[in-house]
Amino acid sequence: MRKLLLFSILFFFTLILTAQDNLTTFILVRHGEKAVDKSTNDPDLSPEGKKRAERLAALLNEGEVNAIYSTPYKRTRQTVEPLATAKDLTIHDYAPNKEAAIDAMLAEHRGGTIVVAGHSNTIPWFANKLLGAEKYQPWEEDDYDNVWIVTVSEKGKLVKLVWLNY
């Protein structure tokens, strides 16, 4: 009887550990404040945006980060550059509003933590695709301080969403 109980407990904990290995965490952020430059649609971060990027790196510095993705714009890349430097990671480009990009991230980094930098309309879209529901609307144009931590077992199977401001 004791062997059966011990086996059951070990089996239960093995299932829990296996399930945790299959959980993938996405940390979704919008780029920091952008510089006002009407001559381009790809401006740099403003001084305030650069400070926000440093705060993001400080916020995420102690936690596990396995990959960093950014849309191919200066402001999104500059938002995650301090974190990439601190973690000694390469920033990978992804195509916003393409579900295949989410699928590729999940396949390559399953069980890990992925930071994704995007835009006021693409980050809520990304979260909705992870959740499998149209729950979130685009953020306001002056809304730069949200961090969404979304943990899924697979796309469409939400485990948890934590909404922070920094």
Image (cartoon, grey):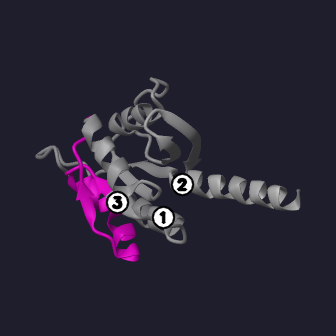
Q: Report helix, strand or loop for mark 2.
A: loop
The extreme left residue here reads 39
Callout 2 amino acid:
Tyr
- Residue found at x 37% / y 48%: 106
Element assignment for label 3? strand
Which residue position holds label 2? 166
Q: CA distance from mark 3 to mark 2?
A: 18 Å
- Where, by quadrant of the figure, is residue 3 drawn? bottom right
Q: Say which of 49 and 18 sits in front.
A: 18
**Residue at 88% across / 61% down in the picture?**
2
Q: Residues in magenta?
A: 69-97
Tell us which disc is closer to us: 1 or 3: 3
Asked whether the beta carbons under mark 2 and mark 1 sit within 8 Å of each other, the answer is: yes
Which residue is label 3 attached to?
68
Tag nearer the camera, 3 or 2: 3
Give the mark nearest the N terminus, 3 or 2: 3
In 3D space, how far apart are the residues under numbered discs 1 and 3 (Cα atoms)?
A: 16 Å
Picture disc at residue 4: none
Residue found at x 42% / y 49%: 29
Where residue 82 appears, as percent x and y from the top left, is 36, 69
